[in-house]
Amino acid sequence: MDRDLSILLTERIKELLKNSSYKSINQFCKQNNISNSTFYSFLNGKKAKAPNLITIDKICKSLNISIKEFFDDEKFS
């Protein structure tokens, strides 16, 4: 995956989490059965790969948005 796309995906996830009702990333991960270490790795740019579509779908469902809404952002224009 292109590094620039990886950065855009990570920025979008951070933005959505910031605007969500979750009080912490730990809370989000725990309530949605997502590995804390993996999640922190790609949020902090330590993981070479960006989240795959399955993970993005899981994040979207957890935030009650569609994948279309996830990508409906000027970052992806």
Image: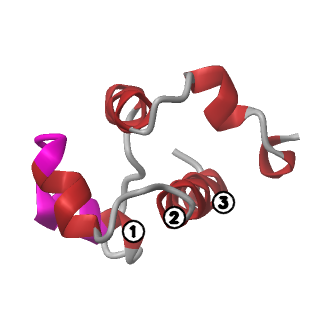
The magenta-colored residue range is: 31-41
Q: Give amino acid for label 2.
A: Lys
- Marks 2 and 1, Cα distance to the nearest angstrom? 7 Å
Numbered circle sitting on residue 4: 3
Q: Position of residue 20 (x, y in %)?
A: 48, 55
Left or right relative to 63: residue 46: left
Residue at image point 64% right, 57% down = 8
Residue at image mark 2? 14
Nearer the observer: mark 1 or 3; the answer is 1
Task: Answer with mark 2 or mark 1, whichever residue precedes in sequence.
Answer: 2
Structural distance between the alpha carbons of marks 1 and 3: 14 Å
User: Disc 2 on helix, strand or loop?
Assistant: helix
Seen from the viewer's position, the closer of residues 4 and 37 is: 37
The residue type indicated by label 1 comes to: Leu
Front position among marks 2 and 3: 2
Which residue type does callout 3 highlight? Answer: Asp
- Residue at 63% x, 51% y is 5
Say left or right for 65 vs 35: right
Does 45 appear above or below 55? below
Give the image location of residue 51, x and y in percent: 38, 45
Crowdedness near tag 2: few (<14), some (14–19) or many (≥20) residues, C-alpha within 10 Å: some
Examine the rendering and report whether any part of residue 34 can be seen.
no
